[in-house]
Amino acid sequence: MGRVQALLPNEVNIAIHNAKKAQVEWAELSMDERCKYLEKIADLIDMYADELTITLVKEIGKPKKIAEDEVLRTADIFRATAQHARSLRGELLFGRSMVRSTKEKVSLAYREPIGVVLCISPFNYPINLSGSKIAPALAMGNGVIFKPSTQGVISAIMFVKILEASGLPKGLVNLVTGRGSEIGDYLVSHEDIDMINFTGSSAVGKSIAKKAGMKRLLMELGGKDAAIVLNDADLDKAAKAIVKGAYSYFGERCTAVKRVIVVNSVADELVSRLKKLVNGLKVGDPIKENVDIGPLISDKAADYVDELIKDAKKQGAKFVCSGKREGRIIRPHLIDKVTKKMRIAWEEPFGPVLPVIRARNKDDAIKIANASEYGLQGSVFTESVENAIYVAKRLQTGTVVINDKSSRGPDNFPFQGIKDSGIGTQGIGYALEAHSRIKSIVMDFK
């Protein structure tokens, strides 16, 4: 599709210098002035939606409808960020409101920019997960260094051209391209980077956290999202939601359903319904036709999924749905009777492979789910409100979805992971807070 420049450290220095210099003047603009740029960016995204969509399909193999949704959703994020940012207000705090305080002190607390924000986006949502980082950073008056994944970089470059076309001040948003292995450490440890907003694997996130020092971090990392199915669940509804959640965009999503934990009494019946739906998924080339399953992002990704499949087969798992690998295309796999000893029970495949683990009861299901190193999302299928709340309160995840697949949800909802699944809270209002800091001015009127 094209060739992309790999920047060297000295070129990275220029980009960071530009962002630092431009940020000072940008922060002097009013919130309303900055938000008008965000609204113009949203309009431009809508204008070039078709071109962006086709580029996503060609570059990362995303089905056209899902790619289009990503683009339009990004425009919505910029508009909603502008709307929410305009509503932010400071506050006055009075010392006499505290019981033991006798002084007439008043504090004016307001939000100010952090400085230069390093935004690192993943391959699977190179426009949406770039926009969800850049929009709040700009709204709160920060400069931006944008480092997209080396896979998905051409889509990201198109997105940056739209930012440029909006008339943003020169040097405010700087695109840095190149391999993370070559300039990643230099970027995250650079003294003029004030915050890092990263989406990617837990392993890379941990590495960044160690090297970032005292920088502010906001991280969306890996997941092993479990769908717990209880014996009173609507199995048709559960099966449809699980298949959509597990195989949409070939499973290359952090919030994909990555394991089913079902109580024994309904396991056979659920697996039968899942099998029928999985066998109906269409496999092929998303550029040529509308498909459910297409090629994974790289040979390395497909090889990894293959390893997990072979390990499960070697250890005696039951393959309900499977098929021969064709290059980077892994046919949808449904694997039953997965045990805790199998890698697929714990590792994140990022591919169209769904393991089914059987549990004795709801407490056993919760225990299996919580044994994971990840804690992004989970879901529970049940017709009992009491059971739903019981499970939701005990699952060690940032979000629990009841009677539906795990998903990021509306972008104004809080989105966060615990354990190895992330640091901080995403979501429009929460992201605005994360990309700013409180400044307090205290006045003493004694």
Image: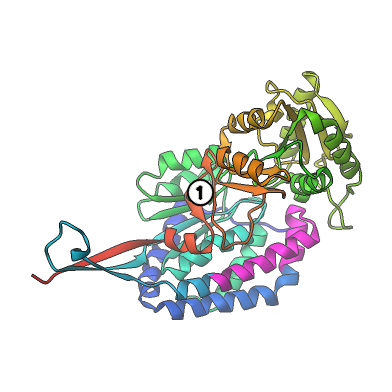
Q: Is residue 218 left or right of residue 440?
A: right
In the image as oriented, which residue stretches furthest toward the top?
Answer: 315
Residue pictured at 62% horizontal, 63% vertical: 157
Query: 238 and 284: which one is in front?
Result: 238
Residue 108 image offset from top left, x and y in percent: 26, 70
- The part of the chain drawn in magenta is 52-80
Residue 72 lies in the magenta-colored region: yes
Q: Is residue 195 found left or right of 441 in the rendered image?
A: right
Q: Is residue 73 visible?
A: yes
**Is residue 328 one of those drawn in magenta?**
no
The picture places residue 330, in percent across and down from the top left corner, at 82, 39
Task: Label 1, secondary structure: give it.
Answer: strand
Label 1 is placed on what type of residue?
Met
- Snapshot colouring: rainbow
Q: Residue at x 59, y 32 (%)?
A: 372
Closest to the observer, 316 or 122: 316
Residue 273 falls left or right of residue 227: right
Residue 387, quarter of picture: top right
Of residues 283 and 270, the one drawn nearer to the viewer in this rendering? 270
For the image, the number of numbered tags is 1
Q: What residue do we see at 87% from left, 42% from top? A: 278
In the displayed structure, would residue 434 be above or below residue 247?
A: below
Q: Residue furthest left?
A: 446
Q: Main secondary structure of the magenta part?
A: helix
How packed mark 1 is, by other alpha carbons closer than 10 Å (few <14, some 14-19, many 20 or more), is: many
Q: Is residue 396 visible?
A: no
Which quadrant of the rendered structure holds the C terminus? bottom left
Q: Position of residue 285 (x, y in %)?
A: 86, 52
Residue 215 rendering spot, x and y as whole percentages: 38, 50
Identify the residue under disc 1. 219
- Quarter in which the N terminus is drawn: bottom right
